[in-house]
Image (cartoon, helix red, strand yellow):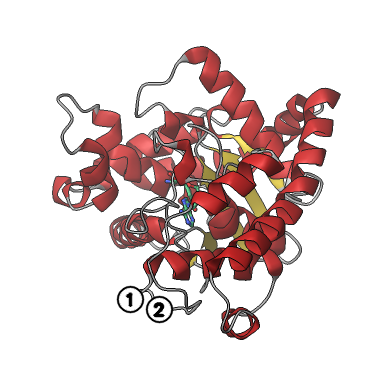
Amino acid sequence: MKRVLSGIQPSGSLTLGNYIGAIQNFVKLQHTHQCYFMVVDLHAITVPQEPKALREQTESVAALFVAAGIDPEKANVFLQSHVPAHAELGWIMTTLTHMGELERMTQFKDKSSGKESVGAGLFVYPSLMAADILLYNADLVPVGDDQKQHLELTRDLAQRFNQRFGEYFTIPEPYIPEVGARIMSLDDASNKMSKSNPNPGSYIALLDPPDVIRKKISRATTDSGREIKYDVKAKPEVSNLLSIYSQCAKLSIANIEAKYEGQGYGQFKKDLAEHVIATLEPIQQRYREIRSSGKIIDILDKGAQRASEAADETLRNVKERMGFLLRG
Ligand code: TYM
């Protein structure tokens, strides 16, 4: 069975972008692949985190995985920090990574630009991400468009290791959806929808109540025209709303364009809000049940146990190939 790995940072409320670009594909792939889905808390601390908030967010993201439909009996749901092999292979991958490769990463450039002091962890972040993927010899990595460059580096590092130390790592393929790989911000369609945006009106959080969703969508920026047409260059805002509509209502974009032909944005936005609510309400309901049941700790424990078995074996093989003297 082919293997899948992906991760999400616990660094704020998850957004509809995370759901459409990543989580809904996690749910799909669990039926056909051996899956590892983790909350990447070690990545989250590459920018300062308040301990109490980090703890709460970590548990919340894990619960959202399950609430969104990941079955912990089918897929391994765990925390990155519960499997120490991540940090260890992360270090090894850092030593194989070139400074120039890290300097070219657009996510690093975006996150560090204008900052007075930037943590070194933010710089080596992609090497740890490569370790995450390679530890499980993942064939497929479901991610949104913004992670493509990190995936390319992972592939390069796997090839570099294989060349130097003999064929070992699987070269992973990205799994990026055609529609929804880059959901944009509601207030500015030139930025991606992001949980770290200080304006909550710019994103829909997975736990936003229905009225908040209605308000955010009704206030979403559009152009001064009235045509509902997918054209990213000429109508970026409307195109973004069409992508969201298509993913939540499970209708093709052409189908939605036809449905609203000759109508303005008002009805379109109203209906869109209802489709988003219908997508998120069952997740929110299950989320509340899981949080109050206290089951998540047990799920994460079991997930970490199974993930450790696979990860420890890889790490041992890697160290052996590299010439580390192993413990007897
Ligand atoms: P993170 O936490 O920023 O985002 C988690 C996932 O959600 C996708 N995503 C989006 N997709 C569509 N539209 C958006 N607006 C949007 N915003 C976020 C991201 O592409 C991602 O798939 N580096 C990763 C976490 C990570 C990881 C890994 C991923 C660590 N190790 C190993 C895959 C494999 C990150 O920061 O994702």
Image position, residue 39 (x, y; %): 57, 37
- Left/right placement of residue 301 relative to residue 212 reads right
CA neighbours of label 2 inside 10 A, class few (<14), some (14 to 19), many (20+): few
User: Which residue is label 2 attached to?
Assistant: 231
Residue placed most toward the observer, 181 or 186: 186
Image position, residue 301 (x, y; %): 72, 28
User: Which mark identifies residue 129?
Assistant: none
Residue placed most toward the observer, 257 or 31: 257
> Is residue 323 in view?
no
- The quarter holding residue 153 reads bottom left
The Cα atoms of the two marked residues, 2 and 1, are separated by 6 Å
Residue placed most toward the observer, 193 or 299: 193
Label 1 residue SS: loop
Residue positioned 37% across, 58% down in the render = 189
Image position, residue 314 (x, y; %): 52, 46
Cβ atoms under marks 2 and 1 closer than 8 Å: yes
Amino acid on which the number 1 mark rests in the picture: Ala
User: Which residue is label 1 attached to?
Assistant: 234
- Left/right placement of residue 154 relative to residue 271 reads left
Residue positioned 81% across, 40% down in the render = 286
Label 2 residue SS: loop
Amino acid on which the number 2 mark rests in the picture: Asp
Image position, residue 27 (x, y; %): 70, 57
Quarter of the picture containing the N terminus is bottom right
- The quarter holding residue 255 reads bottom right
